[in-house]
Image: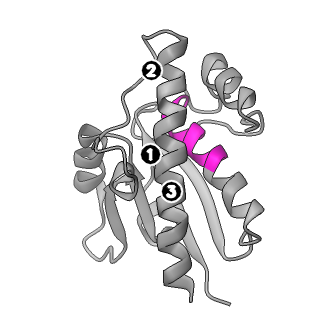
Amino acid sequence: MKQVKVLFVCLGNICRSPTAHGIFEKMVRDAGLQEQILIDSAGTGDWHIGRPPDRRASAAALGRGHDLSNLRARQVCPEDFRDFDYLLAMDQQNLWDLQALALPDFKGHLGLFLDFGNSGLKEVPDPYYGGEDHFEQVLDLVEDASSGLLAHLREQLD
């Protein structure tokens, strides 16, 4: 059975990337593809390693039926470029940071997550210093891009 591994990446792995992780994981499970599509998330920074997602991100996600409580922050490591087929950054700065860390023989997809969506935006804005509406915007963007990513990966798996 063919498998695809996806890693969502933001700065601290407590807001945007765990939101994408939780939402996409539920979509994959609902599609019955959890054995074929494996998901994780990480941050380029190390400030929050081992911590759960931001309480505001968790509350907003739970309001839409996405439970993030089992996720814990971790930092991107060199092995991620061997283990994952898709490393998807939430913004351009994190993409640049990933490109600087990438192993020379990495053959996977390294890009922006919102490239799979229809919002017209390129970056998922960091809601950390914003209000509840910022977390809702992140959910809207992540749900849209997750649908596009799932459609793309279904094509890859066929």
On screen, residue 51 versus residue 88, left or right, reads right
* Amino acid type at image mark 3: Leu
Where residue 12 sits: x, y (%)? 46, 30
- Report the residue marked by disc 2: 127
Where residue 90 sits: x, y (%)? 38, 42
Label 3 CA crowd tier, 10 Å (few <14, some 14–19, many 20+): many
3D distance between C-alphas at marks 2 and 1 = 15 Å
3D distance between C-alphas at marks 2 and 3 = 20 Å
Mark toward the start of the polypeptide (2 vs 3): 3
- Could you tell me what secondary structure mostly forms the magenta stretch? helix
Disc marking residue 9: 1
Residue placed at 54% from the left, 57% from the top? 147
Label 1 CA crowd tier, 10 Å (few <14, some 14–19, many 20+): many
Q: Is residue 1 above or below residue 153?
A: below
Q: Nearer the viewer, residue 76 or 54?
A: 54
Disc marking residue 154: none
* Amino acid type at image mark 1: Val
Residue 121: quadrant of the picture: top left
Quadrant (top left/top right/bottom left/bottom right) for the C terminus: bottom right
* Amino acid type at image mark 2: Pro
Secondary structure category for the residue under label 3: strand
Span of residues in magenta? 13-23
Q: Are marks 2 and 3 in contact (CB under 8 Å)?
A: no
Q: Are marks 1 and 3 in contact (CB under 8 Å)?
A: yes
Residue placed at 68% from the left, 57% from the top? 27
Residue 72: quadrant of the picture: top right
- Report the residue marked by disc 3: 7
Q: Nearer the viewer, mark 2 or mark 1?
A: 2
